[in-house]
């Protein structure tokens, strides 16, 4: 039986389509002087294919819904979707002004606004496919400036740092983390004292737990050791706008604004309400642009201005991504106290509220309170291996009730396991990313389902 879409959803879709139609007409009016060159398409055939696509896409988790509280998947804002679709009618390529004149300027403006959000007066940067490509560029520059020097990151840093340094031919070492999943500064200091380090990667929001490395303490170590700091803020960068961070976390963000950080990565397609893929790499010192210098025999003849392709490793890049980001920032400026910042704070409030309920319930063991909007926990059991099995059971039962969580394998020292027998070094735990602003209003519903399925898995709440 076909389930009809809610009337509100149908009205919203109709409104978006009408808005897009009007914008398309306005854009095409700018090319009205061209001679007609209509393309004929078989609309009936297109409709048949789209019908099949729609059916196939139903085989997905409901990433857009508040009951999807698993991985870091956040629906793009309607203005981003519409601006992206509008730009696709031209399909601009932001590698060069020749391929994306208007969209290239919009990219420069959007990236400059991100730099201002961080607090940088000067910068060099551009959009790219995502955090992996952005971090590749930052580490490539680091390697160019300190050839052969070691790159350090925490054990909870994104796994791509190890891959990227291997790709670049740079040595890499992981620094242990404390009980909150942050880089251990004492361990870092010991490694720096041994010498040979070129760059330290500070993770501003780990993908597993949302932990924020103690950037202020890391930067302070530069008074004794000479190294470059790269901030991987792909996930957590936007949270510098939130007004409900704890003091230690706020201290880390406060060191982003000066010249302490040489480069920074932030992903608009995570908390910036953008479609995939939209990442951004920024360098505090624009002079690193000299490292990118190259000649092209065919793409740079129609403009004397600096092309985005001359300050990046990627070549062809979607101008539509830049247009979508520019439009979103025009509607929702990334400033403290604004609507966009309020949405970030709401996600963190939701994570804190759910964590508080889990902490009070003896059926669960929890990690430290979330620094951002990610929390992890596990069912209490006699052994770590038993808890891992129960996590998988609760995950499956929750999905049957339309509550979609995530599973993660994390070191047991991150959890207050009490008398649980530690027969393994890692534990499969449950993880939630409450990154949608509306998650704050859905915490009660999420908890009710989680409570029920935990009981169904065999854990009875004690009064």
Image (cartoon, rainbow, N blue to C red):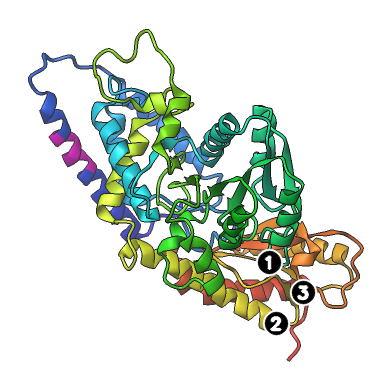
Q: Which residues are magenta?
A: 20-26
N-term-proximal mark, 2 vs 3: 2
| Residue 54 found in image quarter | top left
Quarter occupied by the C terminus: bottom right
The residues tagged by marks 2 and 3 sit, at their Cα atoms, a distance apart of: 13 Å
Task: Mark 2 and mark 3 in contact? Answer it, CB < 8 Å.
Answer: no
* Residue visible at 68% across and 31% down in the picture: 148
Compare residues 405 and 279 and report the one nearer the observer: 279
* Residue visible at 72% across and 64% down in the picture: 178
Measuring from the top left, give residue 169's x and y in whole percent: 69, 27
* Between marks 2 and 3 in the image, the one whose residue lies nearer the viewer: 3
* Between marks 1 and 2 in the image, the one whose residue lies nearer the viewer: 1
Q: Is any part of residue 172 visible from this angle?
A: yes
Please say whether residue 453 is one of the residues in the magenta stretch: no
Decide if residue 177 is on the left or right side of residue 70. right
| Residue 37 found in image quarter | top left
Q: Which numbered marker is on residue 416?
A: 3
From what the image shows, is residue 121 above or below residue 343?
Answer: above
Decide if residue 152 is on the left or right side of residue 351. right
Q: Is any part of residue 206 visible from this angle?
A: no
Pointer 2 local density, CA inside 10 Å: few below 14, some 14–19, many at least 20: some
Pick out the residue farthest to the left.
33
Measuring from the top left, give residue 304's x and y in whole percent: 25, 19
**Residue underneath mark 1:** 180
Pointer 1 local density, CA inside 10 Å: few below 14, some 14–19, many at least 20: many
**Residue underneath mark 2:** 361
Measuring from the top left, give residue 392's x and y in whole percent: 75, 59
Please say whether residue 21 is one of the residues in the magenta stretch: yes
């Amino acid at each position: 039986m076909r389930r009809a879409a809610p009337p509100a959803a149908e009205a919203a879709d109709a409104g978006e389509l009408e808005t897009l139609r009007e914008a398309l007409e306005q854009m095409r009016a700018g090319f009205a002087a061209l001679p007609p060159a209509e393309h004929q398409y078989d609309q009936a055939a297109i409709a048949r294919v789209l019908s099949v696509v729609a059916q196939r896409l139903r085989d997905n988790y409901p990433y857009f819904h508040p009951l999807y509280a698993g991985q870091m998947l956040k629906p793009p804002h309607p203005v981003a979707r519409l601006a992206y679709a509008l730009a696709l009618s031209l399909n601009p390529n932001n590698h060069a002004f020749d391929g994306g004149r208007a969209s290239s300027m919009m990219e420069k403006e959007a990236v400059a606004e991100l730099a201002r959000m961080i607090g940088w007066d000067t910068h060099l940067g551009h959009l790219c496919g995502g955090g992996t490509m952005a971090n590749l560029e930052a580490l490539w520059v680091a390697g160019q400036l300190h050839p052969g020097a070691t790159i350090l990151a925490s054990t909870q840093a994104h796994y791509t740092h190890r891959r990227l340094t291997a790709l670049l031919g740079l040595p890499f070492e992981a620094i242990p983390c404390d009980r909150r999943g942050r880089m251990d500064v004492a361990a870092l200091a010991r490694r720096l004292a041994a010498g040979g380090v070129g760059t330290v990667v500070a993770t501003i929001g780990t993908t597993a737990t949302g932990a924020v490395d103690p950037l202020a303490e890391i930067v302070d170590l530069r008074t004794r050791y000479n190294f470059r700091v790269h901030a991987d803020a792909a996930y957590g960068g936007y949270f510098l706008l939130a007004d409900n961070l704890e003091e230690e976390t706020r201290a880390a963000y406060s060191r982003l604004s000066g010249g302490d950080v040489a480069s920074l990565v932030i992903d608009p397609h995570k908390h910036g309400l953008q479609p995939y893929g939209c990442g951004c790499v920024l360098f505090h010192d624009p002079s690193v642009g000299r490292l990118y210098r190259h000649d092209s025999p065919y793409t740079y003849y129609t403009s004397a201005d600096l092309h985005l392709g001359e300050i990046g490793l990627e070549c062809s890049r979607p101008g539509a991504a830049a247009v979508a980001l520019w439009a979103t920032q025009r509607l929702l400026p990334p400033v403290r106290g604004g609507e966009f910042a309020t949405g970030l704070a709401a996600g963190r409030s939701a994570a804190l509220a759910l964590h508080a309920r889990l902490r009070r319930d003896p059926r669960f063991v929890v990690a430290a309170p979330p620094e951002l909007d990610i929390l992890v926990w596990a069912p209490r059991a006699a052994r770590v291996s038993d808890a891992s099995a129960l996590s998988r059971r609760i995950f499956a039962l929750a999905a049957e009730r339309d509550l979609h969580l995530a599973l993660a394998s994390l070191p047991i020292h991150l959890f207050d396991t009490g008398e649980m027998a530690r027969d393994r070094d890692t534990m499969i735990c449950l993880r939630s990313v409450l990154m949608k602003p509306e998650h704050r209003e859905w915490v009660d519903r999420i908890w009710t389902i989680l409570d029920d399925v935990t009981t169904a898995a065999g854990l009875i709440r004690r009064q």
